[in-house]
Amino acid sequence: MEETEEFALPRSREANERLHAMIPGGAHTYAKGDDQYPEGLAPVISHGRGAHVWDVDGNRYVEYGSGLRSVSLGHAHPRVTEAVRRELDRGGNFVRPSVVEVEAAERFLATVPTAEMVKFAKNGSDATTAAVRLARAATGRPRVALCADHPFFSVDDWFIGTTPMSAGVPAATTDLTVAFPYGDLAATEELLTRYEGEVACLILEPATHTEPPPGYLAGLRALADRHGCVLVFDEMITGFRWSEAGAQGLYGVVPDLSTFGKALGNGFAVSALAGRRELLERGGLRHSGERVFLLSTTHGAETHSLAAAMAVQTTYVEEGVTARLHALGEQLAAGVREAAAGMGVGDHVVVRGRASNLVFATLDGDGRPSQEYRTLFLRRLLAGGVLAPSFVVSGALDDADIEHTVDVVAQACAVYRKALDAGDPTPWLGGRPVKPVFRRLA
């Protein structure tokens, strides 16, 4: 506890105040907000390289969950930055498509062979909302069925209206979104029967913190076909981290539409909507039906971001990055579990998820998720030079980074044990607890 008390971030504190004075929430992504970190210990980043970042106070951290899972190769990865630099002097945006758009589409469809067409954008929300609109247009149906067990799909009304932060979203919009539980085909079929002929699409992450039960994704595929709705896989997280071709490539179930982002650009802004030609062409010009305003973004085909995406795909395929992410994640998970068990908190600091996408849970004395214990844990990690809102690895980590992380986790778990024995983590919080992203009041 004493060491944590000595750890302070005065320049980051000042920078956070400046951020809040000008930017609502003090960050451009809610998950990056300082409310997600212990009070006074939300580092503001100066720069990053590989698996490390430095804050404005000069502290170096081993970083996990880099760029909200987008930087999977490590910061300033040379193959990506070189590809970007080559385009910067050639112009970034034109009044007509660049040849880079042809090359990027060809590369994507070669990497994700389950898709027949692709359209690029800048963020995941645009892609998922385009998939929803396309499904509604193709089926003539109003309702969207989303997986209730997956935390985020879009900033747009059809999803945000279902969260505790639904202010500003008309109820009439939210009423058109219904939910189904992950892994439960019977419940999904009951939902589709209840709203027979009304559901345009089923949208879900094909996998995240748990593996799909045997036959589940194939069963969803069959349900969608039987009930005439579009099956959409949100591959923002699973894309590249599960395989170069996403979860659909790993599990062998082909959706009608899928959306990619995050790891696709290694931090550069690029996302993709991909899928069946018959559907996607409805957003094009070579059909005789009613036109669908699919995706039309000024910066969607920015040349250097597409170059980054091509470099990422090449690197994954040539260097076996997905396998490396799994190996690093397995090494980290084993170390953290051993450290937690050694300190007597193995049932309270719990690592979950696929090795390439690890998260951790912090449970109280009764085994319930606890923001207070999460705060205690994060404080100790930060003081030890580990920035870890999750344990999602990047390919830039090495054995020394993992060993350092496990050592710091062990120190944090020793304090965790003290708090459990005391029955109250409050003396180790240093202020208010961290808060969940989705909550009704600030």
Image: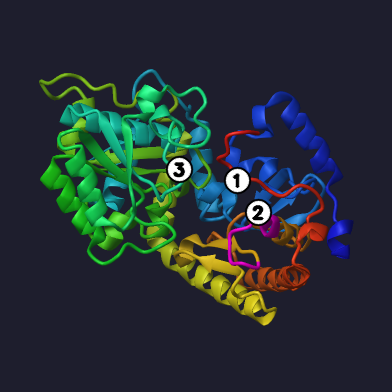
Instruction: State yes or no: residue 242 in magenta.
Output: no
Q: Secondary structure at mark 3?
A: loop
Residue type at mark 1 is: Pro
Residue type at mark 2 is: Gln
Query: Which range is magenta?
Result: 365-374
Mark toward the start of the polypeptide (3 vs 1):
3
Q: Quadrant of the N terminus?
A: bottom right
Is the magenta region chiefly helix, strand or loop?
loop
Give the x, y percent position of residue 154: 43, 36
Give the colour scheme shown: rainbow
What residue is pinned by disc 3? 152
Give the x, y percent position of residue 232: 28, 43
Answer above or below: position of 94 versus 6. Answer: above
What residue is pinned by disc 2? 371
Residue type at mark 3 is: Phe
Q: Are marks 2 and 1 in contact (CB under 8 Å)?
A: yes
Q: Quadrant of the C terminus?
A: top right
Q: Are marks 3 and 2 in contact (CB under 8 Å)?
A: no
What residue is pinned by disc 1? 436
